[in-house]
Amino acid sequence: MGNPTAAMLVIGDEILSGRTRDTNTNHLAKELTNRGIRLREARVVADDHDGIVAAVKALSAAYDHVFTSGGIGPTHDDITADAVAAAFGAPIDVREDAHEILKAHYQRTGLELNEARLRMARIPEGATLIDNPVSSAPGFILGNVHVMAGVPAIFEAMVAGVLPTLTGGDPLLSQMIDVHRGEGEIAAALKALAAKFPDLSFGSYPYQRNGAHGTQLVVRGTDAGLLDRAMVELAELAQ
Amino acid sequence: MGNPTAAMLVIGDEILSGRTRDTNTNHLAKELTNRGIRLREARVVADDHDGIVAAVKALSAAYDHVFTSGGIGPTHDDITADAVAAAFGAPIDVREDAHEILKAHYQRTGLELNEARLRMARIPEGATLIDNPVSSAPGFILGNVHVMAGVPAIFEAMVAGVLPTLTGGDPLLSQMIDVHRGEGEIAAALKALAAKFPDLSFGSYPYQRNGAHGTQLVVRGTDAGLLDRAMVELAELAQ
């Protein structure tokens, strides 16, 4: 449909061990959908240099935009910045602009800007900083990769700062209708509708509520008029 | 560490649009961790044949086990079974054993086993069925790929049926301790501990609670004695 495409890369052992539930992908998905950018793939990888490099290379080659979350803090397992730099063959070191931001933050808070914290000023050459209004340590954009924090409040603030700078597409609109019938009963009619409206996508999601089975039908597309016409036909299925 | 490895593949436009929040990955992650199988990667892809085939091929070659969720219902966008069959070059058609299961289910429920529902009996040649105690339509195992439903209650029931059949490894144990200090203050000491205990992994997760900052330190490994020794040293950090 010609809309820009995107991928999400979540980095962190704690997601893969089940300790932490990733909520950043769902947040990004909604925000991108509103902006008309299609999230086409999401991946979760461990805190492993080679694994991150491979995923960054694969996703940045395949999609218009890549968003990462996690691994940019002060500890030894925060290796995302170095891995993204390696993926692009970019040199990386403590950068003066990021260093100044951290200096000001730690001066304000009265905490020490020690060696570990200084690692958060490691920014690849050629990268643009992403503002962190929550805890100062910046993210960055290198090529088409947006490197952001894993802590949801910071991730969300960074997304809010970055999205307005991206060229969106026609927003993906959706309409839905509840059908008090099983998915299998309306599948044939739904398939025929999908063939009749090739520019729309039709999803069906079975549910069980108060003991009753039903199906939520969702139609998505960028053309509001087409959506309306499809909804008229979907409503007939619901009868 | 010699433990079996695994990957999760979530299939569905509704996850990537943000409509639905994936909970199956977190559930599987916890179950695998308990069983000593390392979840090393998770991916979410769209309801797109080529995308599913490519992901199944990549993950099944890279890890000991692959688990998929989603796309095995009766509607036109349920294409997982055919895509997995294609990834392995296996023929696929309605299979008699799966057909019998569906027949019995629809006879019991008094609903019609129509053409759409019959698609749920499409099982690749050579696959082993996975029991679905919730709604009957089976999943299957082909090669090292476990194909399961997306509806969480069904996914979880299938996981519960499948996991005992897999050879696990030493369970990954973890211990944690709260430190009322910023992540950046204990990062150097944590890095030194990580170097001292190369068979353990150390994670640090900053939090803010009732206005106070702190860090949760988590150490993971398979050797309970080593973990205890590391915890003694971690406890010193917490003072």
Image (cartoon, coloured by chain):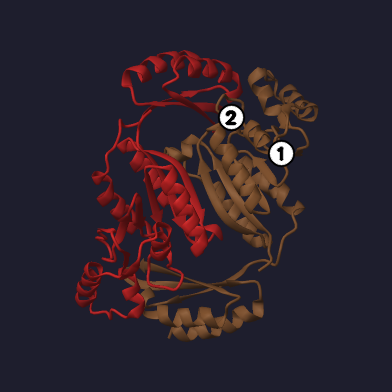
Chain colours: A brown, B red
Relative depth, front residue between A70 and B76: B76
User: Upstream in the sequence, badge 2 or badge 1?
Assistant: 2
At 68% from the left and 64% from the top, the residue drawn is A3
At 67% from the left and 37% from the top, the residue drawn is A134
Could you say where residue A211 lies in the image, as x and y percent from the top left?
Answer: 31, 69
Q: In this view, does A119 lie to the left or right of B92?
A: right
At 37% from the left and 20% from the top, the residue drawn is B227
Q: Is residue A52 left or right of residue A135?
A: left
> Which secondary structure lies at badge 1?
strand
Relative depth, front residue between A96 and A238: A96
Q: Is residue A45 visible?
A: yes
Q: How far apart are marks 2 and 1 (CA)?
A: 15 Å
Identity of the amino acid at label 2? Asp
Packing grade of label 2 (10 A; few <14, some 14-19, many >=20) is: many
Rendered image quadrant of residue A136: top right
Could you say where residue A29 lies in the image, as x and y percent from the top left?
Answer: 58, 55
Q: In which quarter of the image is the C terminus of chain A?
A: bottom left
Say above or below: B118 vs B228. below
Count of marks placed on residues: 2
> Which secondary structure lies at badge 2?
loop
Residue assigned mark 2: A78
Indicate the chain on which mark 2 is placed: A
Indicate the chain on which mark 1 is placed: A
Rendered image quadrant of residue B186: top right
Say above or below: B183 vs A228. above
Relative depth, front residue between B74 and B65: B65
Could you say where residue B180 lies in the image, as x and y percent from the top left?
Answer: 53, 22
Identity of the amino acid at label 1? Phe
Could you say where residue A12 lies in the image, as x and y percent from the top left?
Answer: 52, 37
Residue assigned mark 1: A140
